[in-house]
Image (cartoon, helix red, strand yellow):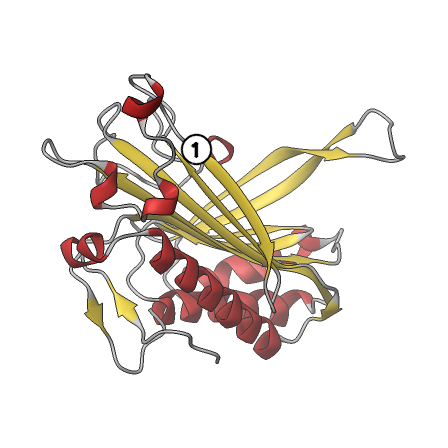
Amino acid sequence: MKRSHPPLKLPRSPLIYVVAQVNISAVVAIERYVPEIQEKLRKSGFPSYSTAQVPEFVFETPGARPVISPLSRFEFLDKEARTAIVLTPKSVAVHTNQYATFDDFHAIIAMALETIHSAASLQLHERIGLRYVDLLELEADEELKDYLAPHLLGYNHASIGVSKGVFSFHFEGNTPYGRLVARHYAPPINNMLPPDLAGISLNYGYRSEPSPGRATLLDFDHAADFKGDFVIEEILETLENLHDGLDVIFRDSVTAAALKKWGRENVAGSKS
């Protein structure tokens, strides 16, 4: 795997959400395989199970109004409901708020893909994506400049005569492995996650809501949009490469002082 920096571990990491998703060629009969998948995942540390119908917006022709159709969603959660595997007829995903290193997360992804593929014989992947969300919470005597790199701080409020200004940004660019997206914004009131992640099933009871005006979000997404045979080893390698791009932009977004506060450790032989 290409590694731009030595592996990094942050014992007091600001990371609050990670998701890896592999979009697949549709398996309309996926529900047929769920009992076998659920039994294997139950024995692999994911005993909780839920199912739901979620709305899917389908644009049948360009410019036409979307058709809303139900999409089956099957979720397999660990005992603490902090890591889960999500299956739909069109995707396989693993999401968590209990993340230590990429090695650990990578192993769960591999297990999920192998379990589902062995039951359903998946044929193609269509998109592979990896997303990290960090919540930066400021203590009473701290400012954003203590955590964020200068190019993310926005305007000087005093020089333009404003108070209580809020700065956000959206950045996109191509990498050798896919499309990299970075966002920075204040978290919504009463929800520490980005708006599109509101209502996710993971348990956040282990932490309190951030103080209004004393927190900000960094949201990084790196995805490879290409169709290929469903070869687990190649998918896992793609995720490793996507992770490297996310690691690079995260380090470019925060200060050395922030990394030190989060307990920076270089870990030999790990994909943190």
Type of the residue with mark 1: Ser
**In this rendering, does residue 16 appear at all?**
yes
In percent of the image, x 51 and y 51: which residue is there? 221
Residue 229, percent from left and from top? 73, 72
Q: Is residue 182 above or below residue 241?
A: above
Residue 271, percent from left and from top? 36, 73
Q: Is residue 30 above or below residue 123?
A: above
Q: Quadrant of the C terminus?
A: bottom left
In percent of the image, x 45 and y 60: which residue is there? 246
Q: Is residue 243 above or below residue 156?
A: below
Q: Which residue is mark 1?
A: 168
Q: In which image quadrant can residue 224 be found?
A: bottom right
Residue 204, percent from left and from top? 29, 38
Q: Nearer the viewer, residue 250 or 200?
A: 250
Q: In which image quadrant can residue 216 be found?
A: top left
Q: Horizontal placement of 230 versus 104: left or right? A: right
Q: Is residue 233 above or below residue 121?
A: below
In the picture as drawn, the residue positioned furthest to the right comes out as 61
In the picture as drawn, the residue positioned furthest to the left comes out as 141
Q: Nearer the viewer, residue 152 or 56?
A: 152
**In this rendering, does residue 84 appear at all?**
no
